[in-house]
Amino acid sequence: MKLSRKNGLRASAIGALVVSGALVLSACGSDNNTETPAKEGGTKTSAAASNIACEGAKGQLLAAGSSAQKNAMDLWVKNFQAACSGVEINYQAIGSGGGITKFNQGQVAFAGSDSALKDEEVAESQKICKGGKGVNLPMVGGPIAIGYKLDGVDNLILDASTIAKIFDNKITKWNDPAIAKLNPGAKLPDSAIQAFHRSDESGTTQNLGKYLSTAAAADWKHDPKSKSWPAQGGQAANGSSGVATAVKDAEGSIGYFELSYATANKISTVSINTGAAAPVAASSENASKAIAAAKVKGTGSDVALSLDYATKAEGAYPIVLVTYEIACDKGNKAETLPTLKAFLNYTVSEEGQKVLAEAGYAPLPAEIAAKVRAIVPTLS
């Protein structure tokens, strides 16, 4: 198991180097810094990024929300701004709840959310989206990793019931019989578990709650729709970055955050015993297997998804999230609409989705991506 995990990490690292190397080579191929003529709207596209269509994008575009997609958004913004001169995309990673609030107050052009809009949030959006409403456009997929720091334990395996009890303060020692049973031969210490959770409203928290409520219903009795941490006990930190930093710094700790934060901080991650033949590691590939089975529950221009958190499919990692970009289907501000459409056209394009693996995310399944690509040009 230990060897397998190291090989998986090595493969992920090689994959990231290949992608980043391709980006560097692409940039190096344009040392003459030649540019194509400016497009209508005052934008230019460099030869190195000629596949990004600026389509009249200009000025500043404000957005806010999910911290889960921050690392992906950083890549997208960097590439888009390099291609489209004079354009500034300002994304604030303040959490899904904060992003939706700003969107429904008309403060941002789009919001990032790790869960689809609730009915009352859609109703609220109609005040801002004149003649339309806010719609859910899936853009980023990936696993929610359960990260931990425990000296001498390189490949920790947990199941849904045990995870629920740890985060609900019912299992408090690392050598608890439930953990020991799942990890025969592991040198589990007789020390306290330090469990960390999000202090802010978070779609990541909500998705973890949905997983625990589905896969461990007898052990997790909290509201699965809550974006605020619902359980007692544990320690809180702000944002996925805050939880990851806390776990990295504290021996005997455990927490939850997107895989990209585990990768960036070199944090060990739990493999999940789903009932399949073998425990499933948190990886982009394994998350994609779970997301590919999602059903579209939205209608019209809305592509909200229903995920199967109780999957037992071989190699399917069950704790996944999909981050949506929330935008008006109609009634967008005229001054930001061209930039909004151009940016989202890029993020959902094949080129935009390919860079996700570099940051530990899972590209959207082809069928879902195709639906979003058809909708973005119709935003008005």
Image (cartoon, rainbow, N blue to C red):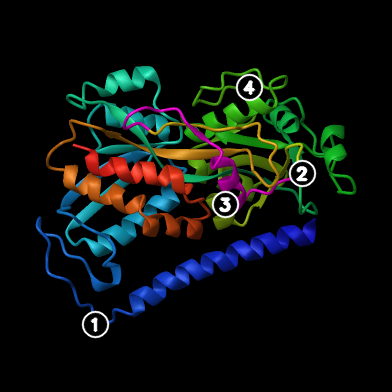
> Could you say which is closer to the camera, residue 92 or residue 280?
280
Q: Is residue 165 left or right of residue 198?
A: right
Q: Position of residue 7 (x, y in %)?
A: 70, 64
- Amino acid type at image mark 3: Ser
Return the disc, 2 or 1, that comes first in the chain's sequence.
1
Label 1: how many residues lie within 10 Å, few (<14), some (14-19) or many (20+)?
few
Return the disc, 2 or 3, that comes first in the chain's sequence.
2
Q: Alpha-carbon distance for marks 1 and 3?
A: 36 Å
Q: Which residue is mark 2?
A: 157
Q: Alpha-carbon distance for marks 4 and 3?
A: 31 Å
Disc 1, SS: loop
- Which mark is nearer the camera, 1 or 3? 3
Q: Which residue is mark 4?
A: 232
- Amino acid type at image mark 2: Ile
Q: Position of residue 369 (x, y in %)?
A: 41, 46
Q: Position of residue 242 (x, y in %)?
A: 52, 43
Q: Which residue is mark 3?
A: 284
Disc 2, SS: strand
Return the disc, 1 or 3, that comes first in the chain's sequence.
1
The disc label shown at residue 32, or none: 1
Q: Position of residue 259 (x, y in %)?
A: 57, 49
Q: Alpha-carbon distance for marks 2 and 1?
A: 52 Å
On whether residue 290 falls in the magenta region, the answer is yes
The magenta stretch is: 277-302
Q: Is residue 179 left or right of residue 206?
A: right
Return the disc, 4 or 2, that comes first in the chain's sequence.
2
> Could you say which is closer to the camera, residue 147 or residue 139?
139
- Toward the bottom, the furthest residue is 32
Is residue 206 visible in this depiction of the protein? yes
- Residue at 57 percent across and 52 percent down: it is 284
- Which mark is nearer the camera, 2 or 3? 3
